[in-house]
Image (cartoon, helix red, strand yellow):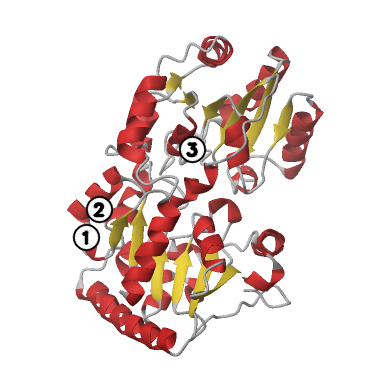
Amino acid sequence: MHPQLTDPSVYFHYQSLYAKKIEEIKERVARGEKIRAGFFVVSLSMMGTKSIFINLLKDELFDAKLVVIPNYDNLFVEQEYIKAKQMFGDENVLQSFQEDGKAFYTFDDMFDIIFFAYPYDDGVMEIHSIEYFAKQGVLTVYIPYGYIVSNFSKNIFISGHVVSCLWKYYVESKLMYEEYLKRSILKEKNAVCLGYAKMDSYRNLPVIHKTNKKIIISAHHTMYIGPSNKGIKFSNFLRYYDFYLRLAKMYPDIDFIFRPHPVFLERLKFFWPQEMIDEYLAKIEALPNMVLHTDPNYFDLFAISDAMLNDCGSFTAEYLFTGKPMGLLSKGSDIDEENYNEYFGIKCANLHYKLHTEIEIINFIEDVVIKENDFMKEERMKFFENEMKGYWPHSTEKIVEDIKHSLLG
């Protein structure tokens, strides 16, 4: 990631450019023109700005457009662009790639404000990055696509270069906000804590009466072999992949939903040939009580599930909104402490039933899921109410109100 700049004046310079842009926006609105709002997205599954975008599409004050931009290896941009048009309508989505698929459009002078769903500038093209637009004085906003639970990313989001370039950073939790105020350069100058807008759309989902219990098996992309691996080590897939299939056979009256991270299948190619990947997916499909779930909207999945075998990062916090039991596929307390940050992540991880072996996973299914002996529920709900709930399910409205007030007073 981009190192922290030694000269903080750069960030305050960007803030001065933002102040000028706000005056321009006021003049634009006074002339009866709309505020041009762009929403830059890499993956729809990682779009923490979705509820904001839908809100602004209905707001007469804004002209909102979604732009699917490529990540550093340009894996999904055309597929995600097609999905975005299906989800939001052709007229609301702009194309970032040219017809040859190799060249990409810039969006200079097209937007007054841009909401970013992907905060890693070194993971996208420079012309689509946060700092690129900060230098132009375009108002840059980041609304998290996930809770910051890992140690690997905590400094990026607390004292990192990119978040210091932002006009507005809508921090997702009280604990994260407190940490940001302690260690960031701009502090409350660009940080606001109004809750986790992404989960607002989880409200009001219908209660579905079902016969079989349903367990989500999540799979993170951080697979590794050997102790020398750097960074987070959430994934246990290479350890348990065959066991997952056996679980479905052991419990024919339980439905298992295999939910991989959006980049999981691409990362798996570093370890398995495509033929082996296809064979594994075919085995899942062949099981009558197991399915692969890759839809960008996984809140419906949360709603119908009874529990999760958790192997991912953000799900460690997001699934707390359901009140349902979670089993953490743990590599032990030492690795957990390496993986999860101390101010938020490890607290969420400790609200899981820690599962270290196949036998412990089976015991979790038997005792907690089937017999419903969920003795950790009260502790989970207390943490959710005190540290996470905030304005939910009205964070979206609060953020839009704050944006309007900051622009127009």
Marks 1,2: beta carbons within 8 A: yes
Residue at image location 49% in from the left, 38% down from the top:
315
Quarter of the image that includes the C terminus: bottom left
Q: Report if residue 380 is visible in the image.
A: yes
As measured in the structure, the alpha-carbon distance from the residue carrying label 1 to the one carrying label 3 is 27 Å
**Residue 180 circle label:** 2
Relative to 398, 116 lies left or right: right
State whether residue 277 is above or below residue 24. Answer: above
Residue density around tag 3, few if under 14, some if 14–19, many if 20 or more, within 10 Å: some
**Residue 187 circle label:** 1
Where does the image place residue 120, in percent across and percent down from the top left?
44, 61
What residue occupies the far left of the structure in this picture? 182
Residue 245: quarter of image: top right
Marks 3,2: beta carbons within 8 A: no
- Report the amino acid beneath label 3: Phe
Residue 255: quarter of image: top right
Where does the image place residue 106, in percent across and percent down from the top left?
55, 80
Residue 83: quarter of image: bottom right
Quarter of the image that includes the N terminus: bottom left
State whether residue 314 is above or below residue 115. Answer: above
- Report the amino acid beneath label 1: Lys
**Residue 315 circle label:** 3
